Amino acid sequence: EWIVLIPDIEGSLETRMKVRETHIKEMIKHIDSGLYQMGGGTLKGDQVGGSAIIARAKTEADVMEVLKADIYTRSGVWDLDKTQMIPVSTKF
């Protein structure tokens, strides 16, 4: 499993909000498949500045493949080059 932290590209908040509904719809299939356990926006002050996801996958590459196809990446919201993937071993 992975804790995935993805910062937004500076100045992309307006775009994030425009494509948010599509992003959430796309997330449902990954939740249903068991890939994403939970997720949401990370805060920078009182505004969203990125995303945090708990993912269940064998490799970082498996997670990154899905992130690359996300509307937030395609629309220039996520800064995938600065993504942090922290492996975890959950117990509960």
Image: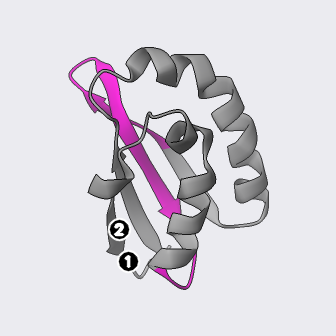
Q: Is residue 27 magenta?
A: no
Do labels 1 and 2 touch, CB within 8 Å? no
Residue occupied by mark 1: 88
On screen, residue 34 versus residue 6, left or right, reads: right
Please state the total of marks drawn on the protein image. Answer: 2
In the foreground, 10 or 87: 10
Q: Residue at x 71, y 57 (%)?
A: 30
Q: Residue at x 67, y 35 (%)?
A: 24
Under mark 1, the amino acid is: Val
Residue 77, horizontal then vertical, whole percent: 44, 34
Residue 76, horizontal then vertical, whole percent: 45, 34
Q: Residue at x 78, y 53 (%)?
A: 29
On screen, residue 70 versus residue 33, left or right, reads: left
Magenta segment range?
A: 40-59
Answer yes or no: is residue 16 visible: yes
Q: Is residue 46 magenta?
A: yes
Question: In what element is the residue under mark 2?
Answer: strand
Above or below, 39 relative to 49: below
Under mark 2, the amino acid is: Met
The prevailing secondary structure element of the residues shown in magenta is strand
Question: In what element is the residue under mark 1?
Answer: loop
Residue occupied by mark 2: 85
Disc nearest the viewer among 1 and 2: 2
Mark 2 closeness class: few <14, some 14–19, many ≥20 residues within 10 Å: many
Q: CA distance from mark 1 to mark 2?
A: 9 Å
Above or below, 45 relative to 29: above
